[in-house]
Image (cartoon, helix red, strand yellow):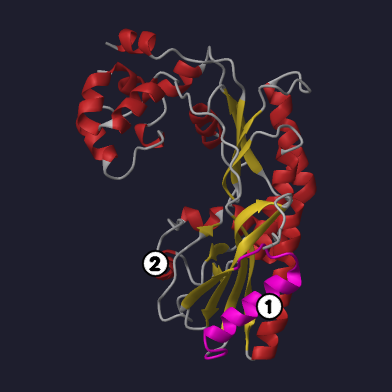
Amino acid sequence: MGELFRLRFPNDTSRRIVHVDMDAFYASIEMRDRPEYRKKALVIAHDPRKTGGKGVVTTANYVARQFGVHSAMPAQEALHLVPRELLVFRDPDFEKYRAVSAQIHQIFHQVSDLVQPVALDEAYIDVTANHDFSNSISLAVWLQRSIEAATHLTCAVGVSYNKFLAKMASEYNKPGGRTVVTPDSAQEFLADQPIGSFHGVGKKTLPKLIDMHITNGAELRAADPQLLERRFGKMGFVLAQHARGIDPRPVEVRKAKSIGKERTYNPPLQSDVAVKKELEHLAAMTVAAARKHELHGKTVVLKVRDVDFHTQTRRVTAENYFEDETAVAEAAWQLWVELGRLQRPVRLLGVTETALAPMSYQNIDLPLN
């Protein structure tokens, strides 16, 4: 059955796909900016001792991970896992992280316009048409060195002929490694990979596969594809493909659906005057970012989070496109007024433009007679 599967779904090995994954991205930025954190167990989360136990871990550095701290874990658990003298909580600063991410993505676009961001710290790049590098290793080295020179941060790079294998390759040698999986080496590479490292194998799927005596890539490849599909539906089909190094998905260049800026305040904002000043600043940055992509929008969204972590959003859609930062700031201020102005000190503000269109789409007033 496996051979029939391979013949029915041939493998395209002509592409060259890169997967870049930054090492403990948010935590690494904080350690770069605060070197005293490097020997600490740094957890990017609101300190649960200050929030009544609320909060979730965004990420953690490798010291904290050695104690079992991981992303999406309740921050409260970190208090029980890490010795108090080592543990440091740091509030996430997404404005700073987005700025660093933008630097990194500028480097990606130096090697290809086919870039698919997965998150602020992760992306696929299709470099099939790039002939500036003699081999994949030299390309991976250039990316790592360029990113480190620009940001003083490290990353893992995987290169292969499809997205699945490129991601497996980047995860194979973290942090800071680089791995190339060629068409000739793909089956050998996959054979020893634990089944839990395959994309789509989560907490529910993993024990079922183990019950079927499938614990690694070699055993997954040996399994009947039809049995996998009957047992796991579409995911079973995908697993059968991945076991054979097949992944036809293209690198997708996504058009922006919204462009915005937000900022966390410590100390919090205590007055309407301070809020208005920050809204003007955020509006200016949002419009500048939209113009960089030659876009403008008809909808403005305001996001507000107070010191009790209560978050509200409001939006307004205009008949015409918002032309400049003044118009966006005025719309954001009116939304603030609709929310009732300052009720509690403000921890976070965000301004976003949506309903985007190219700036070539102008506001046109048609004559009525």
Label 1, label 2: how far apart the Cα atoms are: 43 Å
Measured from the top left, where is residue 241 in percent x and y?
A: 38, 22
Image coordinates of residue 34 in percent, x first then y, are: 70, 65
Q: Earlier in the sequence, mark 1 or mark 2?
A: 2
Q: Residues within 10 Å of mark 2 (few under 14, many from 20)?
A: some
Residue toward you, 369 or 208: 369
Residue 340 shows up from this direction: yes
**Residue beneath disc 1:** 330
How packed is label 1: few (under 14 Cα within 10 Å), some, or many (20 or more)?
A: some
Q: Secondary structure at mark 1?
A: helix
Q: Which residues are magenta?
A: 318-343
- Closer to the camera in the image, 246 or 41: 246
Where, quadrant-wise, is the C terminus in this rendering?
Answer: bottom right
* Residue occupied by mark 2: 77
Residue displayed at 72% across by 50% down: 293
Q: Is residue 53 left or right of residue 274?
A: left
> Which of the 4 image quadrants contains residue 364?
bottom right
Name the kind of residue labelled 2 in the image: Glu
Q: Is residue 275 above or below residue 361?
A: below
